Amino acid sequence: MTLHPSLTIVDHPLVQHKLTLMRDEGASTATFRRLLREISLLLAYEVTRDLELRTTRIRTPMSEMEAPLLAGKKLALISILRAGNGLLDGILELVPSARVGFIGLYRDPETLRPVQYYDKVPGELGARIVIVVDPMLATGNSSAAAIDLLKEKGARDIRFLCLLAAPEGVRRMAEAHPDVPIYTAALDERLDEHGYIVPGLGDAGDRLFGTK
Ligand code: URA
């Protein structure tokens, strides 16, 4: 049985190579941060693959031509604080005109349920392609809650981009938001009793920001 109606595992060799280097517990904060930025560029390539194009007439040094340009819906990138920011920066390099929003959720350590403490998102979400970024799709509870909030605010075309996913999180998203495609670099084995992905890479926020 499939876990989710639309789960894309980006198995490009460069993504897989960089992910292995990031998983290694010996990777420094600087290395981890650089690799996450690099992988985010490659993941962004996949999540934006179906953006609509229009053509425009230009003149090259050689001749005139009809050349493609992005058309249609504008992008909104929504980072789930704080680790989402590690994916955000690279994607913004590729699509610098995207609007950006932030949703802050923390996980109650007892219940593992998400508690929202912050949200600031762009207007007109219904007219945009909304890409939600969070490196770790673990229980899926925070991701599902963030997407609930975005739908309440009018978002309709939503995609979820992460680095690692656990089967539990993918299943939770399939229950709550089967209409939201998921893009990930890898689908790991399972969650441990604290809700961490195994084998995973530990706490993405701590590794990205050098906290503990
Ligand atoms: N969040 C993380 O940073 N790591 C996990 O393994 C799960 C959730």
Image (tube, helix red, strand yellow):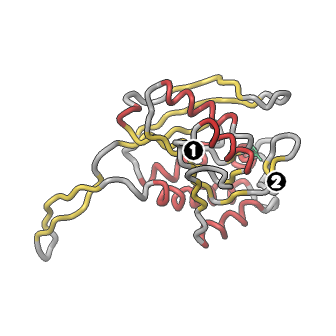
Which quarter of the figure is the N terminus placed in? bottom right
Q: From this viewpoint, which residue is outermost toward the bottom?
A: 62
Classify the position of ligand 1 by quadrant: top left, top right, bottom left or bottom right. Answer: top right
Residue 90 versus residue 45: which sits nearer the camera?
A: 45
Residue type at the position of mark 2:
Val
Residue type at the position of mark 1:
Val
Which quarter of the figure is the C terminus placed in? top right
Residue 33 versus residue 12: which sits nearer the camera?
A: 12
Q: Is residue 169 above or below residue 110?
A: below
The local secondary structure at tag 2 comes to strand
| Residue 51 position in % (x across, y down) | 37, 53
Within 10 Å of disc 1 (Cα), the crowding (few <14, some 14-19, many 20+) is many
The local secondary structure at tag 1 comes to strand
| Residue wearing tag 2 | 198
Q: From this viewpoint, which residue is outermost toward the front?
A: 1
- Total count of labels: 2
- Position of 17 with respect to 200 (left or right) is left
* CA distance separating discs 2 and 1: 20 Å
Q: Is residue 80 above or below residue 208?
A: above
Within 10 Å of disc 2 (Cα), the crowding (few <14, some 14-19, many 20+) is some
Q: Which mark is residue 133?
A: 1
Residue 159 versus residue 56: which sits nearer the camera?
A: 159
Question: CB of residue at label 1: within 8 Å of ligand 1?
Answer: no
Question: CB of residue at label 2: within 8 Å of ligand 1?
Answer: yes
